[in-house]
Image (cartoon, rainbow, N blue to C red):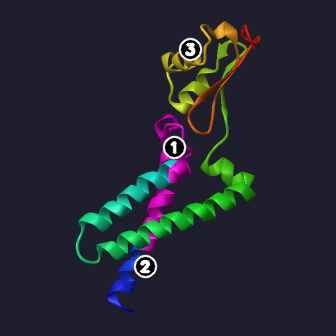
Amino acid sequence: MAPLLTLLLTVVWHSLVLYLFLIFGLRAVGRPIMAQNTLPEYLIVALLGSSVESALYARSGSLAAGLVSAATLLVTSRILTILLVKSSRLRRLLIGTPILLVHDGHIIRTHLRRVGLTEQDLMAAIRERGYGALDDVRFAVMEMNGSVGVVPRRAQPGQ
């Protein structure tokens, strides 16, 4: 096999392995780090930046390697998106499900620890949604994108 083709196939393999490793690694670390993106969305942005960087700053074969890496990531992302739409099991595994943090004004501390939030973080998120106390909250849920959604006990005035 030609050396350039071998290099490009190696880049494809490394890109795939890195992408999958980071999906599982970041899923284990927690959702708040993703800043309103799902894991695949966050990773594609981060890894595309890296692949473009290697194309801009490395040695002579780097442009082709960067383009192959970026293309591999984009194609993989598209395939993964299709698979996630078709498979709820894969969606739960890679993206997760919403996690209940507050139920009828009571914090579920085991779930809070699981997502890596403190009570102060949770209360700040609840206040950002316009609720001043846990008594106002029927449910607070950590969404798949890392945001905290709040369902009030009663409708707020003007709603």
Q: Nearer the viewer, residue 147 or 97?
A: 147
Looking at the image, residue 66 lies above or below residue 112: below
Quadrant into which the C terminus falls: top right
Q: Quadrant of residue 2?
A: bottom left
The CA span between labels 2 and 1 is 29 Å
For marks 3 and 1, give the CA distance: 27 Å
Q: Residue 28: give its label.
A: 1
Residue in the foreground of this view, choosing between 63 and 148: 63
Dot 2, crowdedness within 10 Å: few (<14), some or many (≥20)? some
* Residue 12 as seen in the image, left or right of residue 138: left
- In the picture of the structure, the residue carrying the numbered disc 3 is 127
Is residue 110 inside the magenta stretch? Answer: no
Image quadrant of residue 14?
bottom left
Reading the image, the residue beneath label 2 is 9
- Helix, strand or loop for disc 1: helix
**Quarter in which the N terminus is drawn:** bottom left
Provide residue 82's location: percent of width, then percent of height: 68, 61
